[in-house]
Image: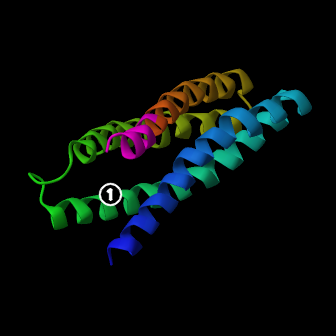
Amino acid sequence: MRSALVFVHLCSVAVWVGGMFFAQFCLRPAAFQLLEPPQRLALMAGALARFFRWVGLAILLLWLTGLARMVNVGFAAAPPAWHAMLTIALVMTVVFAVIAHAVFPRVRVALAAQRYAEAAAGLARVRVLVTINLGLGLLTIAVATLGR
């Protein structure tokens, strides 16, 4: 059971952190280089909507598997790195909630109304928040691997 929990946990990390890296350093630059603003904004909004659904599932699985391991070991007996990961995960989850439920819905509304400057400004806010979460995700991976 422990191996299955770790497997699901790591797959969820790969989806979330890997997806943020791909969006920031591959998808966005290519879209910016190749597409005009209306098409670029539509592509980014469509891709992010799909990605955020997967991230929602990944977050749920991360919390379930992480807490299951923590309960199994006992919070007091859990290594300090696990507590650090739990704290960072809480911050990352809040940042994602802000992106998915506050900033991104306004991007979609602006895009549907063809208010491209407003949609672009919203996507710029999403990018900043995703960059923060990417940094926190990489920090979490460092804690998980180097914090032993």
Q: Is residue 143 magenta?
A: yes
Q: Quadrant of the N terminus?
A: bottom left
Q: Which residue does the image show at 38% across and 58% down from the upper left?
A: 62
Which residue occupies the foreground of this view, 38 or 89?
A: 89
What's under tag 1, amino acid-wise? Trp
2 horizontally vs 48: left or right: left
Q: Is residue 15 above or below residue 29?
A: below
90 horizontally vs 132: left or right: left
Q: Which residue is mark 1?
A: 63
Q: Which residue does the image show at 88% across and 28% down from the upper left?
A: 33
Residue 109 visible, this orientation: yes
Quarter-of-image position of residue 32 = top right
Residue 47 coordinates in the image, percent (x, y): 69, 48
Residue 21 coordinates in the image, percent (x, y): 63, 39
Q: How dense is the environment of label 1, judged by Cα within 10 Å: few (below 14), some, or many (20 and up)? A: some
Residue closest to the far left: 76
Residue 68 coordinates in the image, percent (x, y): 25, 66
Q: Which residue does the image show at 42% across and 61% down from the upper left?
A: 9
Residue 96 coordinates in the image, percent (x, y): 44, 41
The magenta span reads: 139-148
Residue 113 visible, this orientation: no
Q: Quadrant of the C terminus?
A: top left
Which residue occupies the foreground of this view, 76 or 129?
A: 76
Most frequent secondary structure within the magenta stretch: helix
Q: Is residue 56 above or below residue 41?
A: below
